[in-house]
Image (cartoon, grey):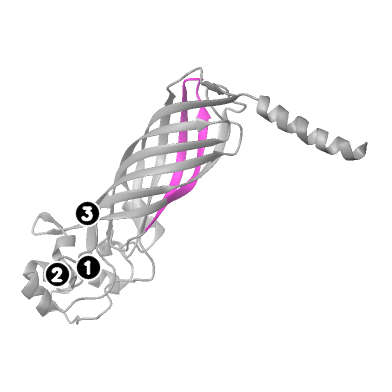
Amino acid sequence: MKKLLLPLFVCLIITNLQAQEKISSFHAGVFTGVSYYSGDLIEKTIDQVAESHPSFGLFLRYNYGSYLSARANVFYGRVSGSDANAEDVNRRTRNLTFRSPILEVGVTPEFNIYDFVLPKSGYVLTPYIFAGAAGFWYNPQAPLEKEWVDLQPQGTEGQEVGSEYNRFAFAIPFGIGLKFKLSELASIGWEFGTRFTTTDYIDDLGGLYPDFDVLAEVRGLKAVTLSDRTPEYTGLPSTRSAGDIRASSKSNDYYLFTGLSLSVNLAPRGKIKP
């Protein structure tokens, strides 16, 4: 008899789960917050705060059941960094600076810690975690003679013509957030998301100083100036040579988006799944 009770109990649980309503729905939303990066032109966490910029986004979220969602999003922000913020005198002497837009398109699954789905929800608030995949476009620039110059075409680290780094790269977004139910029609949220990337050139720094004679011949004197800004800081001729370390190449750059979102349920009554 006892041997029959366990299979019967399992069958009852499975039947009960299958009988529960699984409500799916689509949400459309907007995001606003800040973006910043971590790389060779950021020395301390406080520098990230100083170099943060407004960011914006749109997303479409599909809720499946109470705990799982998937989001497709387009985010736009800016990142920047400067040796002028550094306490290390060697970094200030390097005297490099940059800015870059970040245009990201991604797909990100989300897992709600508590039962949370509109229009029906067991909780009005839930933490959630997320991890996904994204592609992004960036374009590092530096100021020169009162204008911002695109750095990738300059080959500042001696890249051969046609072999410059790609301004499109991939990222792995992951992080945490909170969702709060306003009504069956809407919810607000906050999230903090890091993007590990496949590039070390968001800031145009990835390795060594080039041979400046060759760089001048191939790219011109503007490229040499953008590669080595030390003379502008010291007022003296540069003593840097080909192969000197320009930046750390131990890890890739990463960027972050953090902020608030508002989403609206496109199907207030939801769709009951059998």
Which is more N-terminal, label 1 or label 3? 1
The amino acid on which the numbered mark 2 sits, given as a three-letter code, is: Glu
Question: Is residue 229 among what the camera can see?
Answer: no
Q: Is the stretch drawn in magenta largely helix, strand or loop?
A: strand
Residue 139: give its label. Answer: 3
Q: Nearer the viewer, mark 3 or mark 2?
A: 3
Q: Is residue 93 magenta?
A: no
The amino acid on which the numbered mark 3 sits, given as a three-letter code, is: Asn
Q: Are marks 1 and 2 in contact (CB under 8 Å)?
A: yes
Q: Which residues are magenta?
A: 173-197
In this view, 44 is above or below 117: below
In this view, 146 is above or below 252: above
Which residue was labeled with disc 2?
232
Which residue was labeled with disc 1?
95
Q: Are marks 3 and 1 in contact (CB under 8 Å)?
A: no
Q: Given the current orientation, which residue lies at the most extreme right position?
A: 1
Q: CA distance from mark 3 to mark 2?
A: 23 Å
Q: Given the current orientation, which residue lies at the most extreme top position?
A: 269
Residue situated in front as seen by the camera: 20 or 149: 20
Is label 3 in a helix, a strand or a loop?
loop
Q: Nearer the viewer, mark 3 or mark 1?
A: 3
